[in-house]
Image (spheres, rainbow, N blue to C red):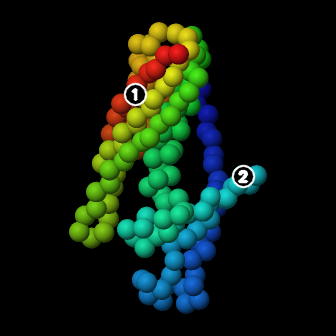
Amino acid sequence: MAEHEHHYKVQITWTGNTGTGTSGYREYERSHVISADGKPDIAGSSDPAFRGDASRWNPEELLLASVSACHKLWYLHFCAVSGVVVTDYVDQPEGTMMLVKDGAGRFTEVVLKPVVTISKGDPQTALELHEDAHEKCFIANSVNFPIRVEASVKTI
C-alpha cells in the first residue's frame, strides 16, 4: 500500500497577557485560542490545577477527546462495512496523568468507555469491532501510553 502524507495546521494564540507579560508566575493568564482556517475557535487554557480557567478546554481534555473521536470514527466505519447499524454512540473517556517532582508529567493510561446502540447486526460483532478500531486509530498509534476500551452494546 502506498504511503500518503497528510499535513495539519492550527494556530495557538496566547491571550493571557494581563499587562505585564510573564513578569511573574502569577502575573499572567494561561488562556489561549486555538484556531484554523474556516473553523470555529476553541477557547483554551491550562487545567485549573495549573492556574488555568476551568471554563476553557485544557490540553489534557483535548487529548482525551482526540483519542475518543478517532476511535469512534474508525469504529463507525467498521460497523458500516460489517452490517452493524449504529444508531447512537456516547463515550466518556477518562485519562490518568502522573506528575513528577520537577513538574513534568505524562499520561499513564486512557480508558475509553463507549456505549453503542445498534438496530441491526450481531452485538458480539459490534463489541469485537472496537478491537479493529483501536488497531487503526491514528491517535492511538501515536501515543506512548496504553489505551483500554471498555465498551458496551445495546440493541433496539
Q: Which residue position is annotated with label 2?
A: 39
Residue 82 seen in the figure: no
Q: Position of residue 155 (x, y in %)?
A: 49, 16
Q: Residue at x 53, y 16 (%)?
A: 156
Please tell me the numbered disc located at residue 88: none
Q: Position of residue 46 (x, y in %)?
A: 47, 66
Vertical arrangement, residue 92 with respect to residue 135, above or below: below
| Cα separation between marks 1 and 2 | 31 Å
Q: Secondary structure at mark 1?
A: loop
Callout 2, which amino acid? Answer: Lys
Callout 1, which amino acid? Answer: Ala
**Which comes sooner in the sequence, label 1 or label 2?**
2
Q: Position of residue 26 (x, y in %)?
A: 43, 84
Q: Secondary structure at mark 2?
A: loop
| Disc 2 packing (10 Å; few <14; some 14–19; many ≥20) | few
Q: Which residue position is annotated with label 1?
A: 151
Of the pair 4 and 124, the residue shown nearer to us: 124
Taking the image as shown, residue 6 lies to the left or right of residue 128, namely: right
Q: Quadrant of residue 21?
A: bottom right
Q: Residue at x 44, y 32 (%)?
A: 114
